[in-house]
Amino acid sequence: MTLALAAIVGIAIGILLGLLGGGGSILAVPALVYALDLPLSEAIPTSLLVIGIASATGVIPKIRAHDIEWRMAAIFAATGIAGTVVGTVLGKHLPDNVVLLGFAAVMVAAGIRMLTGSDDVGTACSTDGSGINWRRCAPRSIPTGFGVGVLTGLFGVGGGFLIVPALVLMLGIEMSIAIGTSLVVIVVNSAAGLAAQFDGLGSNWALTTVFAGAAIIGSVFAARFSTRIDDAKLRKWFAYLVFAVAALVAVDTIVLH
């Protein structure tokens, strides 16, 4: 029963990664903690392993479609690695309840930003065919990449739920490009976070394998259809999902514990 549940949840997470360039990691940690009964210290590195593998698979069709801004991905990845180390250190010194409540707060903030900013696309890094203006773009992209890395290390998330809004709403990157770029950054951040927390992985490799395999299948399937869905609808669905999971985490942490 546990392995079947892991497969179902893994497919759902993979679909979210393929469609949205993020979101799967939002569900991964709560699912591992609440549905599959893993301790938070084990759920975080397990989530990073699964999300990293699924994202690496999902990014392949984006590479073929040239839907990646490689220079922006490099900035987010480089600064994200440093942030991941900082977040990992912080996470090891905070109680689980504090980490989970912080996780819920970040999700709410990301959801609000996606809803309120859906018609207000940034321009700091928009290229118009002439290349990126780094004097305008760097002051936003560098601290944002570092912040996403901190959240990766602290909460065990790939960071797509913040990378996509940041690229679209703050920096002016087209949604389809933002999704592909996000997946590249998630792979790098997840690898850095897993390296820092590898000792937290448990011995239940059967569950981890099923979970990861199902996520890969879902990601590959969904990535084929991501360009056929309206960008505005993607942002709204993404925000509503974030709110629902944040409420679940907050209620369970405050009321049930």
Image: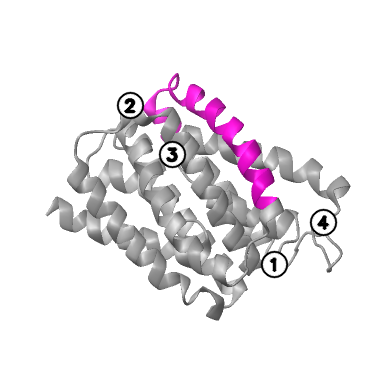
Q: Secondary structure at mark 3?
A: loop
Q: Which residue is mark 1?
A: 174
Give the quadrant of residue 32.
top left
Callout 1: few (<14), some (14-19), or many (20+) C-alpha neighbours within 10 Å?
some
Q: Secondary structure at mark 4?
A: loop
Residue 111 visible: no
Q: Secondary structure at mark 1?
A: loop
Tell me, for residue 199, which label it has, or none.
2
Q: Tell me where residue 214 appears, x and y as whole percent.
A: 29, 60
Q: Secondary structure at mark 2?
A: helix
Mark 3 or 4: in front is 4
Three-letter amino acid code at the position of disc 1: Glu
Three-letter amino acid code at the position of disc 2: Asp
Mark 1 or 2: in front is 2
Question: Magenta-highlighted stretch: main secondary structure?
Answer: helix
Q: Tell me where residue 38 appears, x and y as whole percent.
A: 25, 37
Q: Residue at x 75, y 61 (%)?
A: 172
Mark 2 or 3: in front is 2
Residue 39 visible: yes
Q: Which residue is mark 3?
A: 156
Q: Which residue is mark 4?
A: 132
Q: Nearer the viewer, residue 246 or 176?
A: 176
Q: Residue furthest front?
A: 64
Residues at circles 4 and 1 in contact by the CB criterion of under 8 Å: no
Q: Residue at x 72, y 68 (%)?
A: 119
Task: Give the magenta part as a residue range.
Answer: 72-101
Q: Tell me where residue 245 appears, x and y as whole percent.
A: 41, 52
